[in-house]
Each structure stands twice: as C-alpha cells, then as structure tokens.
Image: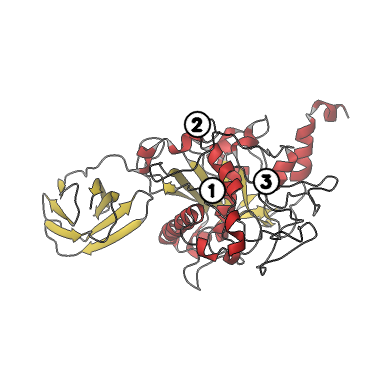
Amino acid sequence: MKLTKSIPKFILYLLSYIVVPLSSGQYCGTQNILKALRIEKSKTIPKVARFFNDTDAPVPLIFHFILNEQQLNRIGGLGGIAERVKLQLIALNDCFNDSLYSSRTPDVLRHLSSKPGIRFALAHTDPNGNFTPGFELRVTNKTGFEERSTIGSTFAFSDSKYSYSGGVDIWDPTTYINVWIINTMNNGGVSSVAAVTIPFIFTQNSVIPDNELGVVINYGYFGVKNAPSDFYLDDRTKGLTLVHEFGHYFELWHIWGDDGNLCPNEMNGDDDGIEDTPPQAGPTFGCRNFPFYDRCSDSNGVGVLFMNYMDYSDDTCKFLFTPGQCERMNSLLSIKGSLYTLNKHPSILLPPGDTVVNMMIDIFPNPTNIFLNIYLSQTIKSTLYVNIIDVLGKICKCYTFNLYESHYKISITDLPTGVYLVNIIYDNKNYYKKIFLVK
C-alpha cells in the first residue's frame, strides 16, 4: 500500500490500461493512451491557425522497417518496401490535399469537407548528413514487438524505438515524422492493434519520453494494395490507416469521443473537441450507406460522419476531414504550434551532394523547358538508369540505357513546372543533380 501511494496516480491509471490486452478489433491504440494520461481534448483552436499553400515546404517523413526475413519476403523484399513507401506517400498527400476524393462528397456534406493542405515528402538526408531513400530496414530475428514492452515507456510497442532492444532509434522529431513499420504482437500472439501514435501532447509528462514520438503501424496495413497477390490485412488496403494515425499526430481524436457509446450531452459523455463533427455514439465498421444515423445523431442533421478519416470505416468509404479538423491540424504547424519546425527544413528533402567518385557528369540546360542532355566524362560498360524525382520523392520518369555511350538526351516536356532531382545510377553508384523546369 505504501508503494501505491508513492506512485503518481496518473501512472497507475496508465498501467491499468496497458497491462490488460487491448480489446479485439480495436484497430487503433491511440485512444488508450489518451485516456490513461487523462489529457483534456481542447475545444479551442488558436487564432494563429492558417492553411498552407504551394510555397510551404513539405513535412519530411522517415519510415523505419523492422521485419524478419519471412515478413520481408512476404511484402516483396526491398523492392516491395520501396513500392509500398511510394504508394503510401501518394495516399497521404491525396487525403491531406483532397486531390482525388472531393468528387465523392455528397452535396449535403460539402460544408463539412475540407483539406488541411499539408504536404508530405520523403527525407533524403539523414541526421548525420548522409543520403537516405526515405526509409531504412533492420532485418531482425524477432517475430514482432509486444504492446507491453520492456524498454522506454514500456507500452505502445516502445521496444521497436530503441536500437539496443532490437528496434530503430528515432530521428530528430523536430525535423522528421518517424514511422515504425513492424509486426505488432500481444502476449506472443497477434495484436488487435493495427497502429498507435504518440503525438507531442503525450510527451508532456514524465511517462513518455520525446524519443518515442511518432507512429507505429503493422506492416500488413502499410501502403496501398496494388495487385491481388499483395500481402495486406483485412480491408485496410488503401493506405488510410496511416492517414488516420497522422490525424492523431496532428492531435485529432476519434470523432465518437471514445466514451463507451455515450452521447456528448449524457453524463460522462465526450466528443472529439471539434465543433463541426456531428455527435456520434461509437465507431463505424464496414461501409455504411449515407445517410446513417445512430442514437446520438440529430434527426435533422447529416447523421454519422462515417466517411471521416478519424472513424473506423473501411478504407474504401473514407474521404474527408472537416474544416474544424483541418484548422486544428494547421494550428500545430503555425508559428506557436508544437510541430512548427517540421516544415522548416526543406534541405533534407534533397540528397546531400551531387557528385560521383571518379566520374564527371554534366547535365544541361538548367533551367530547362524541353529536354536534358546528360554528358559523362567516360563511357561506362554497364546499364545506366536515370530517374526524374519531384520534391515529394515521387519518381515521375525513369529511363534505362544499355547503349554504353557518353551522351544521353531525355525529354521532360510532359512534366509541370517545378524543382526536380535527376538521379543517375550505374555500377551501384548514385548521382543527384537538382534541376529547374520552367515553362
């Protein structure tokens, strides 16, 4: 009893959530930590909030893969990782910039559909100034990582975030958003938690250290399913699990309030702290037909906002954030926001340096508007690969040359105006050059 009195009350409350296996079908584990830390959901949004525009730098992302050989082979090896990273990045930018999904919004919901305008890109410079493709892989002998860990805060798969426990150390969270892709486990078996997020607000106590900031996601929910044979779990195949978790990272909560199916106006009832999300009793599973009402819905309102990214609906029927949610997210990237520094490091989106040992490469004209000439100081006797990469890390064009020449000419007339990287690969060597396309 004396021991109990010596431990802060909120830590005991936290442990009461973590030592018990998470409920079946829970999908997202973030709300357990939110409740355990007794963090109040803010119902006010700072007036400094603003929306982003095309001149804002994207937020750098780094993906830490920790898989065993069997799991790695299951997703197609390094090539499969690169493909999933590429498709996941596209999904994030589509959902946060509404480039694909606005046409799906019913007219009656137009006023509740908005976009935060936050862009994401792969980091190409690591904290030590070296090149990174935007992801790293640690091949392990572990089957996976447990919900209740032994290192750090000891919960939310924290073992995966420390190299000395078989995980991967965090990269500076003031510069990068860190995402760990692992096999999530519970007591040696399959975990019901697909993903869990530690946002900045969770670290404002003595329980969770800053070096656990970020998202942990099961490798079977990461990326976008591109072929029937691709390995994915359940119906979460469109990359929206990470969209949901990034919502948490920007301090959005589940729209039903995580209050045990109560309504906001009932005793002990709660909501997500966002004014324009309608009242909702509990999470939505599957894919409902609009309109859909539950016991908390206003009969004269729009009903349950099951198509919101912060609900649990299937990926195929989620397609919006509300204006209030967008304003909350942007407030964190504003000058007084907790994530303000994340888009202030555009240089790490580009690889360091632009030279290759023992080879002089000249690319011109720069700026250009039609084509590029690539001159090599010597003829190489191997295949030459040329990739044109945009600032979000997407490969826009790729070429393969087996001509063994010293001069190559490529057309880029179909690309929009912007900044690009020319990536030249030969004999396992990489060369990068920044170019400007102006039309």
Q: Residues within 10 Å of mark 2 (few under 14, many from 20)?
A: few
For image coordinates 61% across by 46% down, the residue present is 324
Q: Tell me if residue 250 can be seen.
A: no
Q: Residues within 10 Å of mark 1 (few under 14, many from 20)?
A: many
Per the image, label 1 sits on a secondary structure element best described as strand
* Disc 2 to disc 1: CB gap under 8 Å: no
Identify the coloring.
secondary structure
Callout in the foreground (2, 3): 3
Q: Position of residue 317 (x, y in %)?
A: 60, 65
| Horizontal arrangement in the rendering, residue 140 relative to residue 270 (left or right) | left
Which quadrant holds residue 318? Answer: bottom right
For this rendering, which residue is in front, 185 or 211? 211
Task: Identify which amino acid the numbered label 1 is placed on.
Answer: Trp
Task: Identify which amino acid the numbered label 3 is placed on.
Answer: Glu
Q: CA distance from mark 2 to mark 1?
A: 28 Å
Callout in the foreground (2, 1): 2
Please give the residue where the numbered disc 2 appears in the rendered image: 335
Please give the residue where the numbered disc 3 appears in the rendered image: 275
Q: CA distance from mark 2 to mark 3?
A: 23 Å
Please give the residue where the numbered disc 1 appears in the rendered image: 180
Q: CA distance from mark 3 to mark 1?
A: 32 Å
| Horizontal arrangement in the rendering, residue 254 relative to residue 267 (left or right) | left
For image coordinates 11% across by 49% down, the residue present is 377
